[in-house]
């Protein structure tokens, strides 16, 4: 009974799987209006400009690059002294 049950179960699950997939949704023929796209572009551009202005006011970039160059120099000196050894 077990060997006849498996193919029947497989077929039922296969049919149910195809039923769940169903027909693909119809494609939309409408494209977004150019006015809407322009509005989205202007909004994103405005957000980007305000974020850049805020970052420049904080002067975070120059401070962080100065710190990173200092620590990079220290790290480089340490690596070179380890590779050369004590003189």
Image (tube, grey):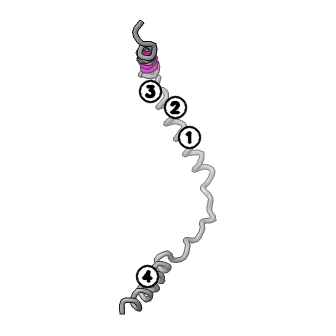
Which numbered disc, 1 or 3, marks the residue that appears first in the sequence?
Answer: 1
The answer to if 11 sits in the magenta stretch is no
| Cα distance between the residues tagged 3 and 4 | 58 Å
Secondary element under disc 2, as helix, strand or loop, is: helix
Picture coordinates of residue 56 (x, y %)? 47, 23
Q: Which residue is mark 4?
A: 13
Secondary element under disc 1, as helix, strand or loop, is: helix
| Cα distance between the residues tagged 2 and 4 | 55 Å
Identify the magenta region. Answer: 64-71
Q: Which residue is mark 2?
A: 49
Residue situated furthest left in the rendering: 1
- Of circles 3 and 4, the one toward us is 4
Which numbered disc, 1 or 4, marks the residue that appears first in the sequence?
Answer: 4
| Cα distance between the residues tagged 1 and 2 | 10 Å
Say the numbered circle drawn on residue 42. 1
Q: Which residue is mark 3?
A: 54
Q: Residue at x 45, y 26 (%)?
A: 55
> Which is more toward the observer, 64 or 58?
64
Q: Residues within 10 Å of mark 1 (few under 14, many from 20)?
A: few
């Amino acid at each position: 009974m077990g060997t006849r049950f498996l193919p029947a179960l497989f077929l039922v699950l296969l049919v149910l799987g195809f039923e769940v997939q169903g027909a693909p949704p119809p494609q939309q023929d409408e494209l977004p209006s150019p006015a809407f796209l322009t509005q989205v572009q202007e909004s994103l551009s405005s957000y980007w400009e305000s974020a850049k202005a805020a970052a420049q006011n904080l002067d975070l970039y120059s401070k962080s690059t100065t710190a990173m160059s200092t620590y990079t120099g220290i790290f480089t000196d340490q690596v070179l002294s380890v590779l050369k050894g004590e003189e």
